[in-house]
Each structure stands twice: as structure tokens, then as C-alpha cells.
Amino acid sequence: MRTLTLLTLSAVSWICSCGTNPATKLPPRGPFGPVQISRPDPFVGCGASGQQIGADVEPSLAIDPGNPDRLVAVWQQDRLATNSAAGATTAMSHDGGRTWFTQPLPGLTLCDAGPCAAATDTWASIGPDGTAYIGAVACAGAGTAADRSAVVMSVSRGGGKQWAHPGVVATAQVSGTSLDKDMILADPRHAGTVYAVWSQVTDLGPSQGATEVDFARSDDFGATWSEPVRMFKGDDTTSQFNQILAPRDGTLVDIFVESPLLSEVSDPPQAPTMQLRAVRSTDGGKTWSEPQTITSFPYTVATDPLSGAPIRATGQDITATSDRQGTLYVGWFAVHTSSQSSIWIASSVDTGKTWSAPITVVQRSGEEVFLPEVAAADDGRIAVLWYQTEEAAAQRRFDVGVWYALSSDQGKLWSDRELDGPFDMSTAPTSSLGPFLGDYEGIVGLPDGFAFAYAKAIPVAAGNGLSAMFFARR
């Protein structure tokens, strides 16, 4: 292990004390919501360059495996008009999501006593002892080049009540590279063990955009981290959206999407083929297998059905989960504006050695479905959450709804319904690729159902800005 110094060890108290006393008898579990969980913007007046006040996007949601009433969410706060965000907001619930305590993630960006101009890709996970972790891509902090990107992690030994300032997991070691799209996972069986995966991107030269996939682990609650291990590097390809899972004790599986290099355009003239791939480790992440191709599908981009303009929702955005029996599920989508749009899943019952043929979760004609998220409940059901446009002929504005589907037979048959909406997507925060609510949303399995955290665009008159965070149980 190499020892990495934490940027600081201070923590802050809650800034919102709304909700019930933890000793109060909890209400019965069951469906409720949607309810808004984001609060007034904590970064008003921060003055970050390109800051979109009230732009709450890209939530991650985690559940305490020892106490399903305890949930932690994190999202990007005040998304910048170009990339990244002015900071991050965390929220903690101790009553199954009925009430929430929110606060900025301390020590991450300049907007809350941190060293970094911006941060992105926040991800939450909770270990079997209740320790909560949040990973992000930001800067490396004091003693390094100000523009050197890093994967950082914040830890809460109080289950999300107070957060230590972030420590560094890994930095971009090679000039002309940056780190992107981290994901973290607290080992579900071993307290204090946590894994991190990310992409290292080449930013300069003829191979601009090429990536490798890297991994590190900590066995002391994030205090120190192993030297990064390269999991995969293609031949001038982009490998992104890593989803790391621990289906069996000692076995790790990372799923990602690999594609030819993609330029910053809405939709290449001839959509390249994406390869959905998996690598495995049976020694805790020290070594990794050669990649296995699960399936392939075309790269597509969701669009505004009224104008045809793109939105920030691309076919790179994959999702994966594992259930209590160790079955793995991976989901993806493709939007064909001239025909159908679909969401599929594939599964593996042997820790990723072999995979089923793709199964259709939902298929639409006239509407677009995009950004799926998958989770498994303790009762054996699986669920998929996604956004869905309304038919163009029925719209006077860019209406989008939040939908979900349930399966009780490991994904063979599905029933779907609308969870929330519609809302006007044209009022969402802006990005270089159009309206943006996130590259992923939050969903976790409960003992007998599912919890959802997602962003919705809201008009300024209806709240404090461009989008807000919502929560529901079903």
C-alpha cells in the first residue's frame, strides 16, 4: 500500500436540520413520493466560472446493507455550462427516504473550502458497517499542479451525517492525460474495503480521446490506496462508464463500453459500433482477465423530437448491478429516431464468465427512451429506471417523463409505468451537447421494493433554478 495524505481531516455539521428524530418510531415502509429532496442552492454567490445556479444533476444513491432505512445520495451542484460542476451536495435519510438532511460535500471545490475549481462524476456507496463513501473526479489538491485531475474520495463513519474532506485515490500521472468517469464500490462483505475504477483519457495528440481503465483498492476505510492497476487498454479506443461489481467473495467484475474514438459531435454520420465488455478478477483486483464481449450495439444520441437537436444522453451510458445470489445484470439503450428506441439487459449467473442473449426491457415507437439504471431487490425482483420523451405529434414543448419497469423472473417479462412527469426538458441545465440532467440517475433495491433518485428540469419560477432532485419508493 502507498500512503496518501488526506487534503484535510475536518468535517462539517449538517446545514439542514429538517426531519424526524432518529429515535422516533419509523413510519411503515411502502410506496410513496415523488418528493423533492434538494434544498435551496448552497452555492449562490460562489461565482464559479460558468456556474448555473440551481442546476442539480446526476444523482447517485446508496443504501446501507445493514439498515435499509438509511440512504445516502449525492449529486453535482450548480453544473457548469461547459463541463463539471461548482461542487456537490449530499443528502442522508434515516427513515427510508421520507425526510432528508442535505449539506454540501465539504472540502471538494472552492465553493466549499476545497482546492478545486470544479468537480464531477460523484458516486456513493455504503459498506456493511454503515461507513459511507463518495468518489469524485476533481483536482489532486495541495502540492500538485492545479490542473492535474484526480479521483478523490470522501468518507463518513457516521453513515452520511458528517464527511471528512476528500483524500486522493489516484492522479493523472502522465502529462496530457486526465481522469474521468470514476465509480466506487464498498465491498458488501468486508468493512473498510472499497474499490475505485476510472478511465484515464489521452487529451492531446493523434490518439486524443483514447482511454485505459484503471483500478485501485483500499482496505483501511480509504486512508491509503493501492497503486493503480491497468485493467484494460484498447488500441486507440474509448473505454468508459465502468460498472464494478462484487458478486462473490473475492471475485470482482468490471463492465464497460468500448468504442472507436468519438469526436465531440451530436451524432457521427455513421454511428460506430459499441462493444459492451467485461473483465474479471479472482484475486481482489491484483490481476484482471482479458476482456469478454457481452454484446454490441450502435452508438446513438437522444434528441428533442420537436427540433431534432441532440441532448446530453448517449449510448455510452450503461448500467449494471448484482443481486444477492450473485447474478449480474447489465443494461443499455439505443435511440433510432426514424424507427424504434429500446432498452435491453443481459445477465450472467457465473460471475461474468458467460452472458445471456440481450432481453428487451422496453421498446417504443414514436418516443425515445434513454439513460436506463438497473437495480435488484432482496425479494428477487429487478427494476429499470429511465427517461422517456412524449410523442412529437402530441407535444407543444419538449416533454419528458420518468419511467420504470419491474420484472419478477430475472428479466424475462417486464411491466412498466410512469413514475413522474412530464416536465419540460428544454429548461434543463445546458451543456456542450445540449440539455443535461446527468449521465446516470440513482436506483437501489430495498428488501421488498426499490428507491429512486433522479433529476427533473423545473422552470425558474417553480424553484430555485434549472433542475431539482426528487426521490420516490415503489
Image (cartoon, helix red, strand yellow):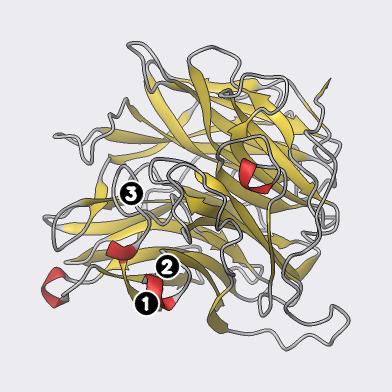
Q: Nearer the viewer, residue 467 or 230?
A: 467
Q: Could you tell which of marks 1 and 2 lies nearer the N-terminus? A: 1
The amino acid type found where label 2 is placed reads: Lys
Other-residue count near label 1 (Cα within 10 Å), few / some / many at <14 / 14–19 / ≥20: some
Q: Kindly indicate whether the residue at mark 2 contacts the one at mark 1 (C-beta within 8 angstroms).
A: yes
First-in-chain label (1 vs 3): 3
Which residue has dot 2 on it? Answer: 456
Q: Nearer the viewer, mark 1 or mark 2?
A: 2
Residue 241, percent across and down?
Answer: 48, 39
Query: What amino acid is at disc 3?
Result: Arg
For label 1, the SS is: strand
Q: Nearer the viewer, residue 108 or 67?
A: 108
Q: Could you tell me how far apart the alpha carbons at marks 1 and 2 are, in whole angstroms?
A: 8 Å
How far from the left and from the top, in percent, is residue 320? 52, 50
Q: Find numbered disc 2 in the image and state the secondary structure of the residue it sits on.
A: strand
**Residue that mark 1 sits on:** 421
Q: Is residue 303 above or below residue 256?
A: below
Left or right of 335, for residue 285: right
Closer-to-camera residue (440/140):
140
Left-right relation of 362 to 179: left
Q: Which residue lies under the disc numbered 3?
A: 312
Which sits in the foreground, 14 or 274? 14
Mark 1: which amino acid?
Answer: Gly
